[in-house]
Amino acid sequence: MHHPATVGTRLRHHTRQAAASLLLMCAAVLPAAAALPWDNARQLVLVVTPDWDSAAGTLQRFERDSAGQWQAVTAASDVAVGRKGSAWGIGLHAAQADGPQKQEGDGRSPAGVFTVGEAFGYAGKADTGLPYQAMTAGHYCIDVNGSSLYNRIVDQTEVGAEAVKGSTEPMRRDLHAKGDVVYRQGFVINHNPQNISGAGSCIFAHLWRKPGEPTAGCTAMPDPVMEDMLAWLQADQHPVFVLLPRAEYERLHHDWQLPHVEAVP
């Protein structure tokens, strides 16, 4: 004959075991949080625009701390984007169906999450932790649909004059475009890394000619903002560039684990 206290103890023990087993089973079937392609990024440049059709926005820089949280390292600065606004580009993010889609010549800046490519400029060297390429009179970015060199910066002395024929993107605009200084300092935003013809090409962060002047699809900013950013960017920190209209940022920033920023009044 079992003592009542012993029976009760055994019942409680079995109940706890059953509960623990159930929790383990639930844990086994619950999916882990999906890894993001930019989980290894330690630096992030965030541009937020008011809406899809806005040609202006704000840029802010962030670093990931030891706890994995994004911390702002600068205040927001004004920047200019495409003259027609922005459109979903091709980058690290999953394809998005809602909203305009970036196309060659549409005057829109690519929206999404992109790796930061090499820095470039007119000077022989630059103060930056990114790979740097000094531009010469022979450097062009190929924006010609159907070209085998589409969306690539090439040197005419290496690929030949015929290969750059039709490109509207000489990288030494000071020599080819009446002293234009916009490419004096900049870096590549890796939109369309598969170089799909017609999906948009030659997307950069670069200097603006005058405050607020829109671009053909790049992101433009004042000299001091660019200089500070180039000095801060480090390739071994796997930096990413993020551009989103405000509504898309609000919809996606939690799932994409982006920094939280308040709307500009």
Image (cartoon, rainbow, N blue to C red):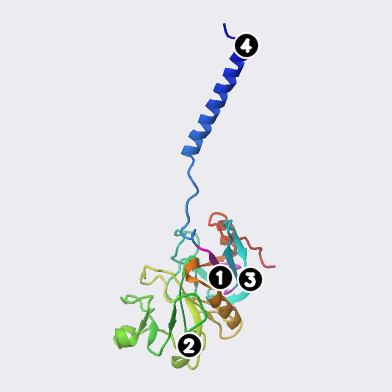
Expressed as whole percent of the image width and height from the top left, the position of residue 30 reads 49, 40
Label 2 to label 3: alpha-carbon separation: 26 Å
Query: What's the amino acid at mark 4?
Result: Pro
Q: Kindly identify the residue that appears in the image at 53 percent across and 57 percent down.
A: 256
Q: Which quadrant is the N terminus positioned in?
A: top right
Question: Is residue 88 visible to us here?
Answer: no
Residue 130 is at least partly visible in this image: yes
Q: Gap between marks 2 and 1, in whole Å? A: 34 Å
Q: Position of residue 144 (x, y in %)?
A: 36, 79
Question: Which tag is nearer the camera, tag 3 or tag 1?
Answer: 3
As drawn, the label of residue 4 is 4
> Three-letter amino acid code at disc 2?
Ala
Disc with the residue nearer the chain's start (4 vs 3): 4
Provide the residue span drawn in magenta.
41-56
Question: Circles 1 and 4: CB distance less than 8 Å?
Answer: no
The residue under label 3 is: 74
**Dot 2 or dot 3, earlier in sequence:** 3
The mark that comes first in sequence, 3 or 1, is 1
| Amino acid carrying mark 3 in the image | Thr
- Distance between the alpha carbons at the discs numbered 1 and 4: 75 Å
| Label 1 sits on residue | 53
- The residue that disc 2 covers is 123
* Residue 203 drawn at (x, y percent): 46, 75
Task: Indicate left or right for 6 with 218 as reference.
Answer: right
- SS of the residue under disc 2: loop
Identify which residue is drawn at 63% across, 14% down: 5
Rounded to the nearest angstrom, the CA distance separating label 3 from label 1 is 26 Å
Mark 4 vs mark 3: in front: 4
